[in-house]
Amino acid sequence: MSGKTHAVLLVLTMGAVTQLLRFLPFAVFSKGTPKPVLYLGRVLPAATMAMLVVYCLKNMAFSALGAWVPEAIAVALVVGLHKWKHNTLLSIVGGTAAYMLLVQLVFQT
Amino acid sequence: MKKTLRYSFLATLPVMAGYLVLGMGFGILLYDKGYPCWWAVFMSVGIYAGSMQYVGAELMAAGTGLLPAALMTLMVNARHLFYGVSMVDKYRGMGKAKPYLIYALTDETYSLVCDAVLPEGVDRKGYYVLVSLLDQCYWILGSFLGGLLGSALTISTAGIDFSMTALFVVIVVEQWEKARTHVPAVLGFGISALCLVLFGADRFLIPSMLAISALLLVLRPRLEGKEGDK
């Protein structure tokens, strides 16, 4: 089996599992949504987004400066920029550019 | 219809910013791994999940087995289960559009549909469909452009995946400013950080989601009625 054929199968596998996860709740709760599930529907978004930020930063470590300082600075910059201008493009591009500069030029790992 | 179109487009502008940058980052990364731009489009339609596509690029380059890849996808994307739970009621009655809406439920699209308060005259179904469709178009375009650009770039793209972190941080900031109670957000941060320490970077998502959901349910008597926006 060639490498590229395997890669196609990988993509299809990852796609299938992803779709399974997305469709499952709709299949399970098709007859009506219980009240606790409705409540979760209202409170989960904020909790989930917070968890996703932690997920993005999961490889941070305090073992070396380069393993946490770029992230800390860049996240602070994103928050600061966003509270200042409320412009998503600016916040994302500014934070990403800062992070890339720090990681490539200042804290080469 | 025009009002719905305009409102939906405006709502997706933050995601457009994020997806174009993030998508290009993905396209460039994938190109660097030896997969030209049409592979990026294939993955953006076949998988359509940003963070998993980034991970997928690594898995493909390493020739990882199908079963480990499936388990990895389960772990990374398990949160999509919770998106579905949040949307079961809101997507009821969406008719023929429903399968597409579910298929397209990514992190960013979820952030736009999960607590959407729509003004007078904006059609809910139209909003859901347009937002989902536009987001996917941005993503496909970004990843395709990234793949194209990858062959032309000489500068290093190390760190470009931070754009995903940046997008999520922006969303958290905006949710925080609008929320009446910060308990869900604080719980989300605290529990996932704790689980990260306890279970390690590769295994903390599922325990986090279970613990977060359990704790939120325990707190339901105190929180119900107080959730939502100011």
Image (cartoon, coloured by chain):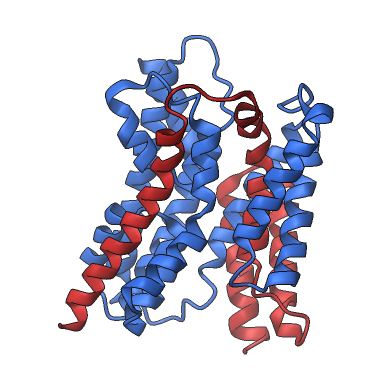
Q: Is residue B178 left or right of residue B114?
A: right
Q: Is residue A79 left or right of residue A104?
A: right
Residue shown at the point (61%, 60%) measured from the top left: B205
Task: Point out residue B195 in the picture as x, y percentages from the top left corner.
Answer: 72, 64
Taking B16 as reference, is A38 above or below it? Answer: above
Quarter of the view holding residue A46: top right
Taking B211 as reference, is B66 above or below it? Answer: below
In front here: B87 or A61? B87
Task: Point out residue B173 in the picture as x, y percentages from the top left corner.
Answer: 71, 45
Tint applied to chain B in the drawing:
blue
Task: Point out residue B184 in the picture as x, y percentages from the top left corner.
Answer: 75, 41
Q: Is residue B152 visible?
A: no
- Quadrant of the rendering where the N terminus of chain A is positioned: bottom left
Q: Which chain is red?
A: A
Q: Is residue A57 visible?
A: yes
Residue shown at the point (34%, 65%) measured from the top left: B146
In front here: B55 or B67? B67
Task: Point out residue B194 in the picture as x, y percentages from the top left corner.
Answer: 77, 63
Q: Is residue B133 left or right of residue B121?
A: left
